[in-house]
Each structure stands twice: as C-alpha cells, then as structure tokens.
Image (cartoon, helix red, strand yellow):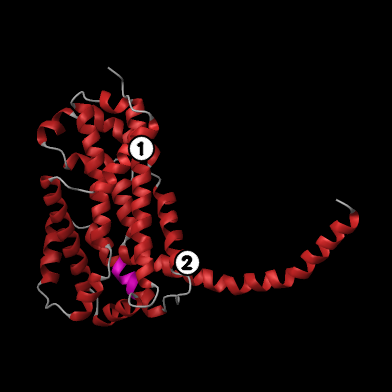
Amino acid sequence: MCFHSVRRRSVLLLSALPWLFGAAVLLAPAQARAQGRAEALMLFEGVQARYQAAYAPGAVSRDAHQLLEPPDQAIAGKAFAALDRAAARAFDVAASVEAIRQEVAVAGQGGAAPGPQVQAALARLAKLRADHAAMDEAAKAAFIQRQHAKPADAVRTELLERMAVVELREVDFSSQLLLGAVVKQLARGNAGQYTALPDATLDMALDTLWSRGVTSPRPRNLLIVAQAFERQLAQALLAALSDADAAALLAWRSDAQAGAEREALVGAYRAEVKASGAVAIRTLLRGWPRS
C-alpha cells in the first residue's frame, strides 16, 4: 500500500474519531440502563440463587437422585459419584449466570433503569427469599401457610403472573430427569447403549429429549407438583412485601421491555442448563468403564 493511501485512511480515521467518541458516549447510558434492568430482573426472579442451588457441586446428583425410584437409588451410588465429578466440570455457575444476564440486557435495551423505589423493593424481596431459604422445613411451611392466609389482591396476582418461576422450575426438572435417567441406565448395567454413540449422535439424542419435554405420566405429575410448590412460594414471598413494594414492582414489570426480557431470561436459562447438562452427560459416559 502506498504512503498516500495510508495517509488518506489515517486522515479519515482521525476525522471519524469525534463521531465514534460521541456514539460511545450516547451508547454508554443505554448500556448501563440495560445492565441495570438485567440485574434487577435476575434479582426479582432469584436466578443466581436458583442456579447455585441446582447446579453447584453436589446439587446435580442430589436433585437427580430424588427422581429415581428407591430400587434404582440403592444401586446408583457409583453412578451418582461419577455424575458429581462430571457435573463439577460441566456446570459453571458464575459463567452461566453472566451469560443469562447478558441476554437479558440485550432484550432490555431501550428500557428505563429501575428507580430507587424498585431497587429497594427488590432488595427486600431478595432478603425475604434468603431468609426463607435459611429456615428449617417446619418454619418454611409455617411461613407459606401464614402468608397464604392473607386475602389475595389484584396487584400481587398480576405480579405473580409476570414472574417466570414456573418456567424456570420446568427447566430444572427436565435437566434433573434427564440426568437421573442416564444414571439409572448406568446403574442397571445398560451403559453400552450410550457409550457406543459418537458425540454428534449423542448430542442429537439429548436435543431430541429436551425438545420433547416431560411427557411420561409419573414425571409429568411430579413436575406439576413441583411447579405448584414453586408458585406457592413465590406467592408467599410477594404477600410478605408491603403494598407499596408490590405496586412498584408491578409497574416496573408492566413496562414495554418487560415481556422481551422475561422471554430472554427463560430462553437463556434453558440454553445454559441444556448445554451444561449435555457436557455433563457426555463427560459421564466417556469416563464410564465399558463392559
């Protein structure tokens, strides 16, 4: 490239710098607002606490264990230990939560940042959720019963409808069911039907299972119960908030960007769980002794 051509490009670049700087200055507040909205929605739905509880070390095998029948639980110790090791390599809580947050932030571009009243309400909701999680089982049941004794009101009913807790619970349940099914086959000595599959075929099979959802009668019934409990807990937490907090949260969750953010949250959560679960299953199978 000749000197004059390089010089012309340099001059054009220098002349464009003020515009680029101005665009960056204009974009920065919008990006900050989107990130603020994403942080707020993650807190509202309790995403980090949920993901940590379901996919931190030891949690994956614990939850999958609960979906197996007692005879399979009794013989699956070695398989569950192997699942623990595989899940520890596959599920990265911090990375997954950040990926979900970024998807929500993209969907929230153009929306207003949550105001002080919304942020204060979210902080109180997060504390209620953490306090409930720290209770023993009897105290948890008493809390839910006490809050459900309060008369239902339109604001909290509508706010509950705008939450994604039921959909997120279905994602967790589907993941637990699939991981439990693989563990069951390993425990029963049927590993060969999986370990012989190439990675691409295995991934396609897992994707097909995910797309079908939970269809068998017993798991479907268990899912309905799990979703009902999740809804009851969310309802109790909202009932424990003040009227002012509930109204502020509903106004925020009724704005123009809220629907897109909710869809992005559920979609990104499902994608992260599905992808990490597939890695865990592949790692588990590839490390399982072939008979």
Residue 18 position (above or below residue 270): below
Residue 87 visible in the picture: no
Which residue is drawn at the image coordinates 16% and 42% (left, top)?
A: 67
Secondary structure of residue under mark 2: helix
Left or right placement of residue 122 versus residue 169 in this view: right
Q: Image quarter for residue 208? A: top left
Q: Is residue 12 placed above or below 209 in the rendered structure?
A: below
Q: Which residue is mark 2?
A: 35
- Could you tell me if residue 244 is visible in this image? yes
Would you say the residues marked 1 and 2 are in contact, meaning their CB atoms lie under 8 Å apart? Answer: no
Q: Amino acid at mark 1?
A: Asp
**Residue indicated by mark 1:** 203
Q: Nearer the viewer, residue 236 or 41?
A: 41
Which residue sits at x=37%, y=80%?
A: 117
Q: Which residues are magenta?
A: 121-126
Residue 41 percent location from the top left of the image: 37, 67
